[in-house]
Image: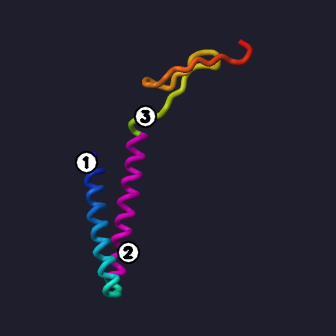
Amino acid sequence: MVKRGMAAGFTVVVAAAVNVATGMLTQHWAWAWWAAAIVLVALGAATQIWLTLTERDAGAARGDGVRVTGDVSGIISTGERSINTQINPPGT
């Protein structure tokens, strides 16, 4: 959770830097500002990709998936905090 907060704060800093680089680029068409804008946007994108992948991995490690048990003529349960549903097959 701390890593995610630090990375989110980092993206705010990168966004501010992109804003400055873009502002300078519109005033001074120099290659250095083009390079700075491109590098900063790529850095922000890489941070977002890292956040997404680490969150997906953390979710898989927690094991919060749905488990379905039962048969067609009984009660189906989808987990601890779920509502059980009675299934009556046709003809019963």
**57 over 12 or under it: above or below:** above
Q: Say if 67 sits above or below 57 in the image.
A: above
Residue 61 at x, y = what percent?
A: 40, 39
User: Mark 1 = which residue?
Assistant: 2
Residue sitting at the far right: 91
The extreme top residue here reads: 92
Q: Is residue 49 magenta?
A: yes
In the image, taking residue 21 as reference, residue 74 lies left or right, namely right
Residue 55 lies left or right of residue 87; in this view the side is left
Q: Which mark is residue 64?
A: 3
Q: Which residue is mark 2?
A: 38
Give neighbour class at mark 1: few <14, some 14-19, many 20+ (Cα, 10 Å): few
Local packing at callout 3 (Cα closer than 10 Å; few below 14, some 14-19, many 20+) is few
Query: In the image, which disc is placed on residue 48?
Result: none
| CA separation in Å, label 2 and label 3 | 38 Å
Q: For residue 17, which quarter of the picture?
A: bottom left
Distance between the alpha carbons at the discs numbered 2 and 1:
28 Å
Secondary structure of the residue carrying tag 1 is: helix
Q: Earlier in the sequence, mark 2 or mark 1?
A: 1
Dividing the picture into quadrants, the one containing residue 9 is bottom left
Magenta region includes residue 87: no
Answer with mark 3 or mark 1, whichever residue precedes in sequence: 1
**The residue under label 3 is which amino acid type?**
Asp
Horizontal and vertical percent position of residue 7: 29, 56
Circle 2 sits in a helix, a strand or a loop, which is it? Answer: helix
Bin the neighbour count of mark 2 within 10 Å (Cα to Cα): few under 14, some 14-19, many 20 and up: some
Magenta segment boundaries in residue numbering:
33-60
Give the amino acid at mark 1. Val
- Residue placed at 38% from the left, 75% from the top? 38
Colour convention of the picture:
rainbow
Residue name at image x 34 percent, y 83 percent: 26
